[in-house]
Amino acid sequence: MMTRRARIIKLLEEGDYAPSELTLALGLRGRGAKKTILEDLRTIQGTLKREGKVLLIKPAECRKCGFVFKPEIKVPSRCPRCRSEWIEEPRFRIKPKL
């Protein structure tokens, strides 16, 4: 049986996922599920450096005004420009380092 982080790595090597999609794919439920995924992604990012891989981040984006957030392992709750809460989550993917 694979660990949760190993399963996340496997999924991200196959395609790109948002944190909420990872929680569904892994069957995680509850209030802290997304927070757990984000913590795992931070840990995985450090592990990948030693393996010659990189965690690619497509930054979160405001669906109302188009503001693009910094590419970081975080899900913003509100746009700093228009204050909209209609935010598209960041997406993550693992690729070999070139």
Image: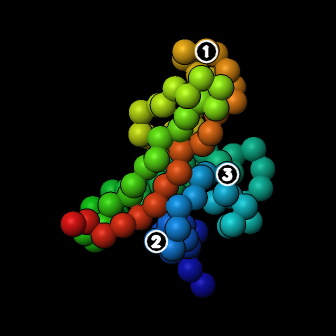
Q: Please indicate whether residue 52 sits to the left or right of residue 68 in the image.
A: left
**82 vs 42, nearest the viewer:** 82
**Label 3 sits on residue:** 20
**Residue drawn at point x = 68 percent, y = 67 percent:** 26
**Label 1 sits on residue:** 82
**Label 2 sits on residue:** 13
**53 vs 50, nearest the viewer:** 53
Q: Nearer the viewer, mark 1 or mark 3?
A: 1
Picture coordinates of residue 18, whole percent (x, y): 59, 52
Residue 13 showing in the rendered view:
yes
Disc 3 secondary structure class: helix
Disc 2 secondary structure class: helix
Q: Nearer the viewer, mark 2 or mark 1?
A: 1
**Residue drawn at point x = 27 percent, y = 62 percent:** 49
**Which residue type carries mark 1?**
Cys
> Could you classify mark 2 by the number of other residues whose Cα lies within 10 Å: few (under 14), some (14-19), or many (20 or more)?
some
Q: Is residue 69 above or below residue 33?
A: above
Picture coordinates of residue 80, whole percent (x, y): 54, 17
Occupied quadrant, residue 61: top right
